[in-house]
Image: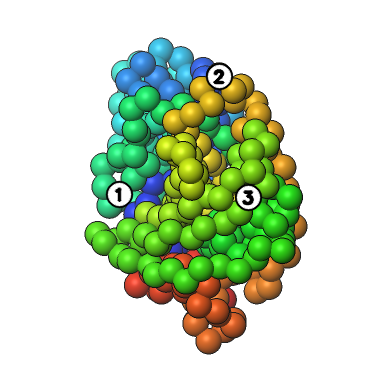
Amino acid sequence: MTIQDKALRKEWHPVLLSSALREDPVPVVILGEKVAVFRTSQGVHAFKDLCIHRGVPLSLGKVKEDELVCAYHGWSYNGCGACTRIPSLPADRAIPMRAKAIVYECVEAHGFIWVCLGVPLSPLPQVSSYIPAGFKEVLMGPYTLQAAGPRIIENFLDVSHLMFVHEGHLGDSAYAEINDYQVQEENGVLTSEEIIVYQPDSDGTGRGVHSRYVYEVFSPLCAAFTKREKDSDYLFRLFLMVLPVTEQESKAFMLKQRNYAYEEADEVFVRFQDMLIEQDRVMVENQKPELLPLDLQAELHLNTDRLSIAYRKRLRELGVTFGTA
Ligand code: FES
Ligand code: CO
């Protein structure tokens, strides 16, 4: 079932790591819609994963000479979705006008392939404007989670779970108190004030530090935090971008940036994140109701949940119906 969420249909959704898209088309699902993603010499393309001839998924086909060729009867579609060749048609017969693929916006940016099912709000995904020079970056994902996208984003924004779900790594339950902080909104981006957390192992390299967190929410399913250590210039930023496969299944992609530990193997950070995700999985896959309640009376909020409250309000303002129970 496809999900007709007007707000989310205007967003860029990460669907694949660039490295996962090679010669063959790859099937993905966005808001319940099956999409075939493929690469030609002109760039990346996304079509509805359905051949108009007999309903076979176009992702079963092959890319030949920069066109997507259907596996069933060999109809060939160019990057604009026009059918250019029907092998069974006698040479003097015109290709029917309706022989077209349904084309979605698709871009490759910053190591990911992104698709928008509607008219995008901006030419490129927001993450493209946050690429500091000289930072070491690691791309991660996809992590498949049986949870609603907004539940996953809210878990990422939830500082008071760090001392319990990630105890011994991102927090210590003996130091669970959260300082008061405010959340500002500017140009549609939510930003928190600093929240200080004692972390026995803040990033997988085993250093115990007091981290100063600043959270940002860019769009319904894209957020980041920047962590600065109290006594150093070390800066660590983690983006979370969630693909809503269906209402209750998601794929999480992450982009980690750091300005230190350049020699450390990426594997160290990836393994650490893999472990954290498994800890979070137990929570987000079991929350009820499955969809994030946008009615602020529905759950019990504390002052320390200010960021979650702001996020829920923002989703309401944007008209995200997807998260409404
Ligand atoms: Fe695609 Fe026939 S179903 S060419
Ligand atoms: Co967590």
The residue pinned by badge 2 equals 263
Q: Nearer the viewer, mark 3 or mark 1?
A: 3
Instruction: Tell me: 299 left or right of 258.
Output: right
Which residue was labeled with disc 3? Answer: 199
Which of the marked residues, 2 or 1, is nearer the chain's N terminus? 1
Q: How is the image coloured?
A: rainbow
Give me the C-alpha separation between circle 2 and circle 1: 38 Å
Q: Is residue 237 left or right of residue 249?
A: left
Give percent across and percent down for residue 313: 41, 74
**One can see residue 145 in this view:** no
- Give the percent coordinates (x, y) of residue 1: 57, 59
Q: Determine whether 280 is above or below 133 in the image.
A: below
Q: Residue furthest front?
A: 231
Local secondary structure at mark 3: strand
Q: The residue under label 3 is which amino acid type?
A: Gln
| Residue that badge 1 annotates | 120
Per the image, label 1 sits on a secondary structure element best described as: loop
Report x, y in % for residue 269. 62, 33
Mark 1 crowdedness (10 Å alpha carbons): few <14, some 14-19, many ≥20: some
